[in-house]
Image (cartoon, grey):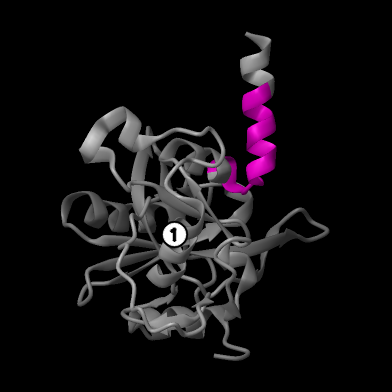
């Protein structure tokens, strides 16, 4: 959807007909039971705060209620803003990647936190090239994570966390056998195009704790950076 405006994007994915999305933080599709929030990359996971526009806050509280009490899905897409000479915040682009998230309530502040997804270990066995980052349309656009790439990574690198070396099978026995997350060293949201993935160079097995720490605080650090953090912390005890 080349040169698609933010309003056109919201209308397309949500089935709406806004003339403008200016001043709105969220959008509702009752037919799909979905609430879409714009997520300012400078605000971390915060999607709604009382310190923002009173009208926008009141409008979006109705959408929050639908997520909390009516079973609506919470979706987000990233927006980019900038300050003008008067100090006013203005829209400066958006990322047309929609992600389903979990709502977290902290007083009168609302956050959309990432959901950990455990991928299937089934493979196609076709021997074809593996591509990651290909956009597909289900209900909304999302980046495709190929389970074939995940399995190829695990076949080569095993099921031990490559950061803290936690072994699920050793700790939990049969229940923990072949359980592990797979981390994309370069996040797919930063690639924004289809590419041929090298399962050994581009992917790494990590435990859920290390995976969460890699992505914490709104930005992703490298596995080596996290290893250094662990080494310094353990070494200082």
Residue at (28% x, 68% y) in the render: 34
Q: Position of residue 108 (x, y in %)?
A: 39, 37
Tell me if mark 1 has few (under 14), some (14-19) or many (20+) residues whose alpha carbon lies within 10 angstroms of its own: few
Q: Does 5 sit left or right of 178 as displayed?
A: right
User: In the shown orientation, is residue 57 left or right of residue 233?
Assistant: left
**Between residues 153 and 232, which one lies in front from this camera angle?**
153
Local secondary structure at mark 1? helix
Residue 1 in percent (x, y) is at 54, 90
| 225 in magenta | yes
Q: Going 60% across and 91% down the picture, which residue do you hit?
A: 2
Q: Which residue is mark 1?
A: 155
Magenta-highlighted residues: 216-231
Query: Does residue 170 appear to the left or right of 136 in the view shown?
Result: left
> Residue at 57% of width from left, 66% of height from top?
189
Looking at the image, which is closer to me, 189 or 185? 185
In terms of depth relative to the viewer, which is nearer, 170 or 106? Answer: 170
Choose between 130 and 83: the one closer to the eye: 130
- Residue 225 spot, x, y in % from top left: 69, 39
Q: Is residue 174 visible?
A: yes
Q: Main secondary structure of the magenta part?
A: helix
Residue 146 appears in view: no
147 inside magenta stretch = no
Q: Residue at x 58, y 72 (%)?
A: 197
Residue 151's image quarter? bottom left
**Quarter of the image containing the C terminus?**
top right
- For residue 228, what is the image quadrant? top right
């Amino acid at each position: 959807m080349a040169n698609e405006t933010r309003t056109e994007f919201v209308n397309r994915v949500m089935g709406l007909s806004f003339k403008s999305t200016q001043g709105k933080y969220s959008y509702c599709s009752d037919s799909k039971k979905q609430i879409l929030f714009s997520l300012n990359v400078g605000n971390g996971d915060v999607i709604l705060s009382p310190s923002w526009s009173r009208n926008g806050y009141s409008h979006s509280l109705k959408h929050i209620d639908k997520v909390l009490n009516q079973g609506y899905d919470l979706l987000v897409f990233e927006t980019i803003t900038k300050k003008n000479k008067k100090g006013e915040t203005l829209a400066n682009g958006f990322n047309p990647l929609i992600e389903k998230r979990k709502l977290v309530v902290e007083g009168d502040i609302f956050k959309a936190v990432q959901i950990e997804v455990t991928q299937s270990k089934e493979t196609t066995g076709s021997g074809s090239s593996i591509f990651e980052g290909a956009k597909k349309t289900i209900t909304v656009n999302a980046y495709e994570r190929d389970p074939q790439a995940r399995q190829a990574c695990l076949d080569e690198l095993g099921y031990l966390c490559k950061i803290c070396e936690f072994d699920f099978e050793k700790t939990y026995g049969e229940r923990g056998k072949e359980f592990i997350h797979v981390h994309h060293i370069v996040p797919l949201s930063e690639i924004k195009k289809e590419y041929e993935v090298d399962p050994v160079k581009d992917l790494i097995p990590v435990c859920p704790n290390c995976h969460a720490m890699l992505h914490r605080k709104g930005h992703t650090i490298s596995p080596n950076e996290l290893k250094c953090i662990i080494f310094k912390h353990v070494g200082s005890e």
